[in-house]
């Protein structure tokens, strides 16, 4: 019901702002829909863009989450070369705009390598998410009192067992609200991959705009699609978070 209300509100606002003078709004909407979606099967361009956006987002989240765990382990391991490497890597990823890193990766680092631009995008976005998630993981783990680790060892657990069964579940509950935001931001940031010739959802809208000379409908349509993708992902993550807090009602 909430999703339906939101979509309906967006459609009403779009119709109210429709820049057509002297023409019924519904007729203008239908004409633009035919021109931007149905004509020449342009919906296939949109569908291909959605698939590319989903592919980049999925593999970047998976790769970035794993890399973040590795960087967090290096950061907290106490071996100074690994600690230094993790600190420098995280500082670089957090200090340089993601678009600049993406273009450096494609046009410089992988310029002489025959690699799919989608793969470059996945690596770059994964690196960025890994840097941020490593610090999120570390803050969550360090927020658990050291006495719980000592208690686990005293009960006969190994360090790995103590971390898996005692520390990790508590840390996950602490970090998930922040990590959700980073994941949603990554999905939205995939809209910049058009700079390296990847035809994602945003690039698909730009292609349609260049063919129909209508900027309003394609861009509003893509905005709504990004909103729906982010909303669905946020709903899934919130449902997962609620399973970690069985006695807590999570709004939204």
Image: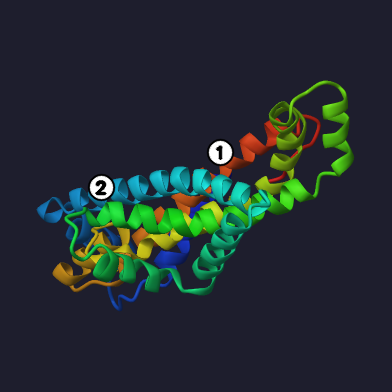
Label 2, residues with CA under 10 Å away: few <14, some 14-19, many ≥20: some
Q: Which mark is residue 47?
A: 2
What separation in Å lies between label 1 and label 2 (alpha carbons)?
Answer: 22 Å
Residue 178 seen: no
Please state which of residues 139 and 5 is positioned toward the viewer in this rendering: 139
Q: Residue 236 bears which disc, if any? A: 1
Q: Residues within 10 Å of mark 1 (few under 14, many from 20)?
A: few
Taking 24 as reference, is 125 above or below it? above
Q: Position of residue 150 (x, y in %)?
A: 86, 34
Task: Report helix, strand or loop for mark 1.
Answer: helix
- Is residue 197 at all visible to an observer of this figure? yes
In the rendered view, tell whether residue 80 sits above or below residue 65.
below
Q: Residue at x 48, y 49 (%)?
A: 64
Give the number of callouts.
Answer: 2
Residue 109 x %, y %: 29, 66
**Mark with earlier residue (1, 2):** 2
Residue 243: image x %, image y %?
69, 30
Q: Are marks 1 and 2 in contact (CB under 8 Å)?
A: no
Q: What's the residue at 86%, 22% (across, down)? A: 155
Q: Quadrant of the N terminus?
A: top right
**Tag 2, which secondary structure?**
helix
Q: Position of residue 124 (x, y in %)?
A: 39, 59
Res 218 quadrant in image: bottom left
Residue drawn at 37 percent across, 54 percent down: 123
Residue drawn at point x = 42 percent, y = 72 percent: 17
On screen, residue 130 versus residue 119, left or right, reads right
């Amino acid at each position: 019901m909430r999703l339906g209300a939101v979509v309906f509100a967006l459609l009403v606002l779009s119709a109210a702002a429709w820049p057509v003078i002297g023409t019924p709004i519904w007729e203008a909407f239908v004409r633009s829909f035919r021109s931007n979606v149905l004509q020449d099967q342009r919906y296939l361009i949109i569908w291909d863009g959605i698939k590319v956006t989903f592919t980049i987002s999925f593999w970047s989240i998976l790769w970035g989450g794993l890399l973040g765990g590795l960087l967090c382990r290096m950061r907290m391991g106490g071996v100074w070369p690994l600690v230094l490497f993790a600190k420098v890597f995280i500082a670089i990823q957090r200090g340089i705009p993601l678009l600049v890193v993406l273009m450096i990766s494609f046009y410089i680092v992988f310029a002489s390598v025959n690699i799919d631009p989608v793969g470059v995008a996945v690596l770059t976005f994964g690196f960025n998410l890994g840097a941020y998630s490593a610090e999120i993981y570390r803050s969550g783990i360090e927020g658990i009192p050291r006495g719980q680790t000592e208690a686990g060892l005293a009960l006969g657990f190994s360090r790995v067992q103590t971390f898996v069964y005692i520390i990790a579940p508590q840390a996950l509950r602490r970090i998930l609200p922040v990590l959700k935001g980073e994941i949603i931001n990554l999905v939205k940031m995939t809209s910049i991959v058009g700079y390296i010739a990847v035809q994602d959802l945003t690039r698909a809208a730009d292609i349609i705009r260049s063919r129909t000379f209508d900027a309003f409908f394609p861009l509003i349509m893509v905005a709504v699609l990004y909103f729906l993708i982010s909303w669905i992902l946020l709903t899934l993550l919130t449902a997962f978070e609620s399973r970690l807090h069985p006695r807590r009602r999570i709004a939204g």
